[in-house]
Image (cartoon, rainbow, N blue to C red):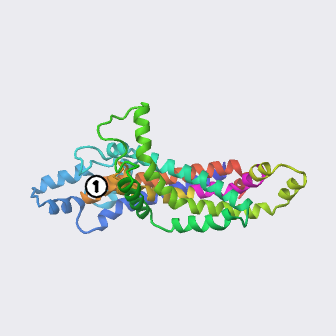
């Protein structure tokens, strides 16, 4: 329990730091978001109208020591203000409508990359020196060296435009109403394949190489030699003895990779016009929607911190030794 409480304290401190940074950045910039928005649109408002608009959008220009406690209170209650680009919709409603698509894309990509990468790493390490071990790791690392958006654009051009195998944009066909029908689920899956494939290809090499290196070290342990001396079957030794212990570092890597997966999903959403947080964030930047940008930053930060905290809890159950560290 002490280990979990310490971790919770660290993550709470990190979240407080992100809230503080989110509060300070707009105020460190020259002017304020409302003034920049009005100057860009060349609108002229009376001073009292500007003050009312600042208060409505949650960018009051009073002393920071007065605004800061109120800002933290609004954030903790989910009040991020009103979206400028989608006025008068609250920021929380805009994020709530886009977050499920980002979680779907990032979650599916992460699960596929973890499972497939670890399996390939297990096979490569168990058959060390084979064709699989000699060719596949360098190839996966080579593909993983490309940026997410480059792979996304290349796969979109090849499979979407040239071959016509995949839809080009959005999360489902235009005109379809989101329901739990088989037709809609299959349509969403068809639109999900290419964006998820782009993320998986970039991240697969890291998972495979990490598992391969851990498996090679595990295969040299005495209990593996004892299991072989007992005449146990190869699949049982490989999966139940070697892979089971080699998976522990991968659990930690899941938490570390969530941030990279989220970042890759944001870029991929822009390429495929996928209606998630990343695509919405691009629109917020183009429209100078500061409340929406701040709300998305905090939401993504909170999601990554929460996921890492849950990974830490799971790791304590898999390896009780960390509880005493």
Look at 60% across and 53% down and name the residue there. 116
Look at 71% across and 59% down and name the residue there. 325
Q: Is residue 253 magenta?
A: yes
Residue 25 point in image, percent of width and height: 34, 64
Q: Residue 127: in sight, yes or no? A: yes
Question: Camera-side residue: 251 or 322?
Answer: 251
Question: Camera-side residue: 289 or 2?
Answer: 289
Left or right? Give the position of 256 relative to 122.
Answer: left
Residue 257 point in image, percent of width and height: 54, 58
**Residue position marked by numbered label 1 in the rendering:** 283
Question: Camera-side residue: 34 or 83?
Answer: 83
Residue 303 point in image, percent of width and height: 47, 50
Q: Where is residue 269, by image quadrant?
A: bottom left
Question: Camera-side residue: 72 or 152?
Answer: 152
Q: Residue 13: in sight, yes or no? A: no
Q: Helix or strand or loop: what does disc 1 sit on?
A: helix
Q: Where is residue 32, by image quadrant?
A: bottom left
Range covered by the magenta-colored residues: 240-254
- Magenta stretch, overall SS: helix
Q: Residues within 10 Å of mark 1 (few under 14, many from 20)?
A: some
Left or right? Give the position of 43 relative to 260.
Answer: left
Residue 316 point in image, percent of width and height: 68, 50
Farthest residue in the right direction? 230
Look at 57% across and 62% down and name the residue there. 205
């Amino acid at each position: 329990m002490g280990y979990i409480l310490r971790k919770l304290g660290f993550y709470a401190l990190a979240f407080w730091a992100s809230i503080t940074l989110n509060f300070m950045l707009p105020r460190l910039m020259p002017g304020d978001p409302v003034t920049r928005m009005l100057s860009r649109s060349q609108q002229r408002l009376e001073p009292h109208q500007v003050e009312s608009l600042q208060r409505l959008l949650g960018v009051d220009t009073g002393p920071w020591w007065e605004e800061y406690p109120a800002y933290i209170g609004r954030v903790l209650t989910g009040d991020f203000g009103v979206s400028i680009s989608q006025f008068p919709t609250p920021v929380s409603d805009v994020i709530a409508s886009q977050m499920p698509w980002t979680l779907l894309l990032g979650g599916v990509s992460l699960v596929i990359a973890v499972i497939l990468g670890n399996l390939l790493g297990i096979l490569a390490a168990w058959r060390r020196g084979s064709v699989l071990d000699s060719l596949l790791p360098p190839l996966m690392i080579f593909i993983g060296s490309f940026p997410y958006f480059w792979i996304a654009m290349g796969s979109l051009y090849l499979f979407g435009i040239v071959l016509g195998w995949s839809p080009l944009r959005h999360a489902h066909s235009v005109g379809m109403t989101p329901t739990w029908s088989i037709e809609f689920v299959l349509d969403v899956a068809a639109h999900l394949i290419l964006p998820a494939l782009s993320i998986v290809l970039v991240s697969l090499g890291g998972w495979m190489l990490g598992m391969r290196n851990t498996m090679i070290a595990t295969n040299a342990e005495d209990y593996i030699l004892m299991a072989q001396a007992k005449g146990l079957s190869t699949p049982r030794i490989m999966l139940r003895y070697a892979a089971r212990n080699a998976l522990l570092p991968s659990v930690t890597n899941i938490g570390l990779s969530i941030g990279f997966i989220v970042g890759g999903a944001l870029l991929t959403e822009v390429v495929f016009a996928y209606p998630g947080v990343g695509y919405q964030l691009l629109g917020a930047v183009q429209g100078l929607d500061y409340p929406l940008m701040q709300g998305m930053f905090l939401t993504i930060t909170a999601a990554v911190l929460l996921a890492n905290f849950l990974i830490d809890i799971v790791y304590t159950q898999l390896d009780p030794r960390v509880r005493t560290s």
